[in-house]
Amino acid sequence: MDTSLKILRNLMRRSLILLVIGLGLISIVGTGSDDNDNGVVLSNTAPVAQIDSPSDSMVYQVNNSVTFTGSATDAEDQVLTGNALTWVSSIDGRIGTGANFTINDLSKGTHQITLTAMDSFGLADSTSVSIIMNPLNNTLPTATITSPPTGTTYNFGNFVELTGTGYDAEDLWLSGLSLVWYSNKDGQIGTGSTVVTQTLSSGTHIITLRATDSQGTSGTATLSLIIKNTPPMATINYPPDGSSFSLGQSIPFNGSGEDTEDGNITGTSLVWTASNYGVIGVGTNITIDYLPVGTDIVINLRVVDNGGLVDSDSITITVGP
Amino acid sequence: MQVQAQPEEPHIRHTDAIHPLPLLTGLTALLMGALIYMTDRPPQTAWLVHALCGNLAVYGKLPPLFGALGNVLPAFLHVLAFSLITAGVMVQDKKTYAWITLFWFCVNALFELGQKFPDTVVPWIARGSSGSHLLARTTNFFSKGTFDPLDILAFAMGAFMAYALLIVMHKKE
């Protein structure tokens, strides 16, 4: 009896020790950046917010009821509800929380309605629509973009000149701060009837001219522009083409990715592959010692820039027995 | 008046019992470590702390309690806390204390060093991970964490402090 009790206690003690060690190891990983003060946020997927109603550019008369409906999903928290969803108007400030509510006291003018969804890790996503609360008998202004034609393509860094007008039945021709230009990629890019910029990021932009009258209501016009993305350049610096190594020998690889828009490309945007193994690593520097024996093994470095353009560089090496 | 001496009980070391003093001291050190994440750092920088007590965080609402010390204190406290807790559930003698503190120093130091060589460590973990959530977090730890030599020093100090405390507690017992 005594012996079996002793064995049981021994077993329990060993389990307890293993549990403590396990918790210790988990807590090292679980406190992630506990050993640096950079505040690195370990991976958590941000939620995705969506406004179902009202639709963008809807016009209501002042004092009309407006129903707001939206949702947000999150990989970790699933469906977000309640205070995790916050609705803010650019004119009236915070107007409500949750997936659904109705109000009838929005101020006159064009409201940028933003739904912000925040997950339990504090990561947030926002989405917006514009709605117009139009005072009685007010005519909405109109906006017109006169140049450039929609679909015009520019090289990255070139000057882009945008010209447009705004007209309102009550205020007549609008100018200055009443005309605001936005890019869907870069945000506000200028005000007035003419705007010149050379800082548009690469990619396709939807450019919007918003003309706002003295009642705060607005009309918009849009066009699309393309800012060409230049491809990156991949270079394998080491080892030299045609190098030979022995089986099991550590082989260091060094490469770089240069891009006009992104500068020095690093990290997972550089992927190394070997023709007789597959992916062998990511980043500017890797060292491996497990390549199988082979001649004419093609080592490829593939670099992808933020615009999704790709370049590759290759060398051939030999791993001998 | 004659006082009759009571026969002295032989001193018995309950080597197979839980030892509350190192255990409780270790748990206190662990709580103090968690407090740093509540007050001095964004709680989402550590998923475990965030998941367990993220709602209690007062980061940003109060000035940092630990100042510059808060950068290395978690490293110090981790080795200290787990050395004491492990000793609390293990057989108690000086040699075991030395092994326990050395073990926790080495484990922490190896994890820290792994952050210096993520390109080597991450593919090695990735080969065995096959979708495990914890191993994915471990990969994150190595690929996103930053190696800090001061932490190695903090681990060593934590191990030394734990050993010294255990010896003092041992003598007291």
Image: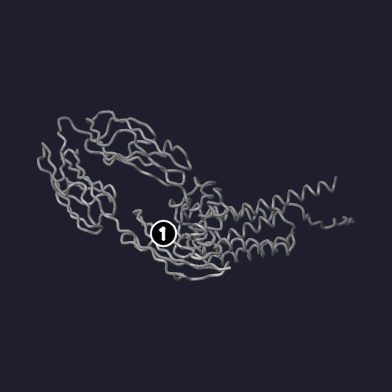
Left or right of residue A114: residue A26: right
* Mark 1 neighbour class, 10 Å CA radius: few under 14, some 14 to 19, many 20 or more: many
In the rendered image, the vertical position of residue A208 relative to residue B156, given as above or below: above
Q: Is residue A65 above or below residue B25?
A: above
Q: Residue at x 28, y 28 (%)?
A: A65
Seen at 22% across and 31% down, the residue is A62
Comparing A50 with A93, the one in front is A50
Q: Is residue A192 visible?
A: no
x%, y% of residue B30?
Answer: 59, 54
Query: For the residue marked with disc 1, what is the amino acid?
Result: Arg
The residue that disc 1 covers is: A302
Residue A149 image point, x, y percent: 17, 47
State the residue at coordinates (11%, 36%): A169
Above or below, comparing residue B146 to residue A14 in the picture: below
Q: Residue at the left extreme?
A: A172
- Total labels: the figure holds 1
Q: Position of residue B52 (x, y in %)?
A: 54, 46
Q: Is residue A255 visible?
A: yes
Look at the image and tell me in which quarter the N terminus of chain B lies.
bottom right
Instruction: Return the residue found at the far front.
Output: A295
Kindly indicate the quadrant of the structure image that contains residue A111: top left
In depth, the one of A63 and A160 nearer the eye is A160
